[in-house]
Image (spheres, rainbow, N blue to C red):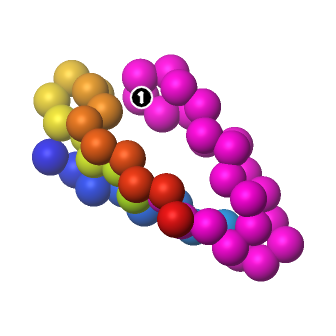
Amino acid sequence: MKINTLSTAKGETYILTLPDNSKVWMNAASSLTYSIVVLDTLTDAYLS
């Protein structure tokens, strides 16, 4: 299993496409942590 974390800085936004083709729109000063297992299957995602 691989854990990935993406954070945006104050004043920054970001759009991310996850391995299951879902999209996450991140606002400023936010963080997304998600895990990927075999065959690029998304298992969990936590947005703060």
> Is residue 33 shown left or right of residue 28?
left
- Residue 42, horizontal then vertical, whole percent: 31, 33
Residue in the image at 27% along x and 55% along y: 3
| Residue located beneath label 1 in the image | 19
- The residue type indicated by label 1 comes to Pro
Quarter of the figure with residue 16: top right
Q: Badge 1 local density, few (<14 within 10 Å), some, or many (20+)?
A: few
Secondary structure at numbered mark 1: loop
Residue in the image at 62% along x and 67% along y: 30
Is residue 26 magenta-colored?
A: yes
Is residue 2 magenta-colored?
A: no
For residue 45, above or below residue 4 = above
Residue in the image at 49% along x and 57% along y: 47
Pick out the residue farthest to the right. Answer: 11
- Residue 38, horizontal then vertical, whole percent: 15, 30
Front position in the image: 29 or 37: 29
Residue in the image at 40% along x and 54% along y: 46
Quarter of the figure with residue 11: bottom right
> Is residue 31 shown left or right of residue 4?
right
Find the magenta span and give its range. 9-32
